[in-house]
Image (tube, helix red, strand yellow):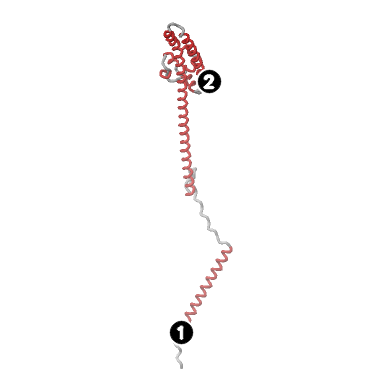
Amino acid sequence: MIRSVPPMLRAVLAGLGVLAALASGAPAMAQAPAASGPAAKEAASAPADGPDLAAERVRIRAERDRINAAKTQEQRACQDRFAVNDCLNASERRWRAPLADLRRQENAIQDVERRRRSAEQVRQSEARAAQAQAEAAQRREQALQDQKDREARAASKAGGPQPTGEPREAAPPKPAPGPTPGQAAANASERARRVEQARERKREAQARAAKEEGKGKPLPVPP
């Protein structure tokens, strides 16, 4: 049956190991070994509906139509014979093998498509996992950088080590701002007023003391 497989389909199936299944006469899906080798990788990387497989589907359908047409014509001719049943049974046996071979070829093509779809799903899953890992690593790096920035700002405010690791010198105290000329004149006037008030209170106190002292002296004795 291997000789009946067309060269185009044979090239596609060789890398996937399904020709051995066709040779054993078993369905390709059950007997075909796992794909391996450069030819298998090339076949698996091709689109599922590539030109080779599409052309093989068209060829198989055309071949099946041709066989069925010949079979129908032959079985019609059996109706004109004396042994109709024997003729029909012989016709069934004659066309059974070619039709089964076409069916095995269809199974092989479907197996190729399944393998390609499975490989594409694995590729997409690995791509999503790699992207998720890259995004997680980027988030961790950004979080570390944000933490370093916060620590640097806190150290800058507290006069601690700089982001470079060197201690920050304490800033000298700022001198207190002096009074303006207007404020200085007002302060001098206020001081003078307070001094004058203090002197006035002192004079008043001395006057009261002298007055009290005069009242306490006895009157002089008349002669």
Q: Nearer the viewer, residue 167 or 84?
A: 84
**Quadrant in which residue 85 is drawn:** top left
Q: Secondary structure at mark 1?
A: helix
Quadrant (top left, top right, bottom left, bottom right) of the N terminus: top left
Residue 78 sits above or below residue 177 on the image: above
Amino acid beneath label 1: Lys
Q: How many numbered discs, if any?
A: 2
Residue 47 sits above or below residue 76 on the image: below
Q: Nearer the viewer, residue 164 or 90?
A: 90
Mark 2 or 1 closer to N-term?
2
Residue at the spot of label 2: 51
Q: Nearer the viewer, residue 87 or 206?
A: 87
Residue at the spot of label 1: 215
Residue 10 x/y as whole percent: 48, 15
**Which residue: 48% across, 79% down?**
208
Residue 117 x/y as whole percent: 47, 25
Point out which mark residue 161 bears.
none
| Residue that protrudes farthest toward the top in the picture | 82
**Which residue: 44% across, 87% down?**
218
Residue 32 x/y as whole percent: 42, 18
Query: Tag 1: Cα neighbours inside 10 Å, few (<14), some, or many (≥20)?
Result: few
Residue 200 sits above or below residue 40 on the image: below
Query: Tag 2: Cα neighbours inside 10 Å, few (<14), some, or many (≥20)?
Result: few
Residue 169 sits above or below residue 76 on the image: below
Q: Secondary structure at mark 2?
A: helix
Q: Give how far apart the Cα atoms at labels 2 and 1 are.
A: 141 Å
